[in-house]
């Protein structure tokens, strides 16, 4: 063998080994990345599945059938939002003030109208003590429940269930409800705690012995338990009726939405997951929103709405002549209000005034 060949051998071997080592290193790196990607994908899938599985759905459309108001001719939408005072579970029972009531009632009810363009919204509160005509409904088991007059609005949920609440609202308003959202007491508390509390301007001192809520007038940062007591208090303000606290509920709704937007929670994955986990565990929706994907898509379509511009209105009511502890829809104001929502037009000023104020 020539000296050149002998000298060339080791160099050639080193040159040949270099690419092999680089290829082997590349394969190891790609392998590690693949494992990390798979692990990350599994984590993402687990997180998605957990959140998706948290959401409970109610098939409102099937339950109500075709006997419903027509859909808006525009792209406007109407949501029925209920705060449920379910006593199911120790935590909900404790938050309910220690009560032993069975079943659940719709403690808070809002019809949220989102006009075409998704740039503003109006929330109409329905007082829980409003006497309404409950239409004929069908229970989950299939049994028919006959119509009944002069029932308290918040009792419909306990008597027949959420689909009947939607049907009752549609019958009294002529407004087609596109989506249904419900959150229970414990979920509300956890949601507020998850975002670190909500700041509200308390207009007057509140001393509610029934709930234990004590707040002094001024700017206050409320945790979950305080927030729940705040939106439920009725003995510490006004005349002690349900009407007095509706203003607090509307004020808190805007403060909560503003808090979520100011913290940019949707832009913070860690924060968003913490909020989403708390919220989805407490949510019951209609079948159309009962998945994380559908709920997220609907949420994104609402991004253009500024909470500060949301208009809040109470359904105009008058004290019932036979029972002053109850109220009934006041006409013609209530009719004017529902007509504006049906036609996706501005609400007349006269329709925002209620003969019964709870003051």
Image (cartoon, helix red, strand yellow):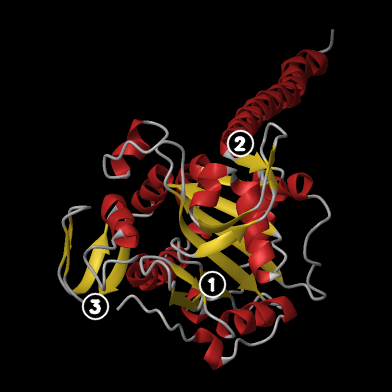
Residue labelled with disc 3: 203
Asked if residue 170 is positioned above or below residue 228 in the image, the reply reads below
Residue 260: x %, y % from top left: 45, 62
Asked if residue 103 is positioned above or below residue 260 in the image, the reply reads above
Q: Quadrant of the N terminus?
A: top right
Front residue of 87/50: it is 87
Query: Residue 352, labelled with which disc?
Result: none
Secondary-structure class at tag 2: helix
Is 115 on the left or on the right of 130, as rendered?
right
Front residue of 127/218: it is 127
Residue 283: x %, y % from top left: 54, 45
Q: Quadrant of the C terminus?
A: bottom left
From mark 3 to mark 1, how far is it between C-alphas?
Answer: 21 Å
Residue 28: x %, y % from top left: 66, 23
Asked if residue 125 is positioned above or below residue 354 in the image, the reply reads above
Residue labelled with disc 2: 44
Among numbered discs 3 and 1, the one appearing first in the sequence? 1
From mark 2 to mark 3, how far is it between C-alphas?
Answer: 44 Å
Residue 300 in view in this figure: no
Front residue of 7/255: it is 255
Which residue does the image show at 24% across and 70% down from the upper left?
Answer: 237
Picture quadrant where residue 326 is located: bottom left
């Amino acid at each position: 063998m020539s000296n050149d060949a002998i000298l060339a051998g080791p160099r050639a071997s080193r040159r040949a080994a270099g690419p092999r080592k680089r290829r082997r290193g590349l394969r190891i790196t790609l392998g590690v990345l693949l494992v990390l990607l798979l692990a990350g994908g599994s984590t993402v899938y687990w997180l998605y599945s957990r959140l998706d599985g948290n959401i409970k759905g109610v098939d409102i459309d099937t339950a109500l059938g075709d006997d419903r108001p027509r859909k808006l001719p525009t792209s406007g939408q109407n949501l029925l939002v209920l705060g449920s005072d379910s006593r199911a579970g120790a935590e909900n029972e404790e938050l309910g003030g220690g009560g032993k009531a069975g079943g659940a009632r719709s403690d808070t009810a809002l019809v949220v109208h989102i006009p075409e363009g998704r740039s503003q919204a109006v929330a109409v509160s329905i007082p829980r003590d409003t006497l309404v005509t409950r239409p004929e409904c069908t229970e989950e088991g299939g049994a028919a429940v006959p119509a009944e007059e002069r029932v308290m609005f918040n009792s419909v949920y306990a008597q027949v269930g959420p689909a009947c609440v939607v049907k009752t609202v549609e019958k009294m308003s002529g407004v087609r409800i596109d989506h249904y959202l419900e959150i229970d007491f414990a979920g509300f508390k956890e949601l507020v705690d998850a975002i670190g509390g909500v700041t509200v301007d308390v207009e007057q001192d509140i001393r509610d012995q029934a709930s234990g809520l004590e707040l002094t007038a001024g700017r206050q940062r409320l945790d979950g338990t305080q927030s729940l007591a705040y939106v439920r208090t009725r003995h510490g303000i006004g005349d002690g009726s349900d009407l007095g606290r509706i203003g607090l509920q509307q004020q808190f709704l805007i403060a909560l939405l503003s808090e979520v937007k100011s913290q940019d929670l949707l832009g913070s994955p860690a924060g968003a997951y913490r909020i989403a986990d708390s919220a989805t565990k407490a949510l019951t929706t209609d079948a159309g929103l009962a998945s994380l994907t559908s709920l997220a898509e609907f949420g994104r379509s609402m991004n253009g709405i500024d909470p500060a511009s949301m208009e809040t209105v109470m359904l105009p009511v008058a004290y019932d002549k036979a029972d002053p502890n109850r109220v009934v829809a006041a006409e013609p104001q209530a009719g004017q209000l529902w007509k504006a929502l049906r036609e996706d037009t501005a609400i007349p000023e006269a329709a925002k005034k209620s003969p019964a104020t709870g003051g």
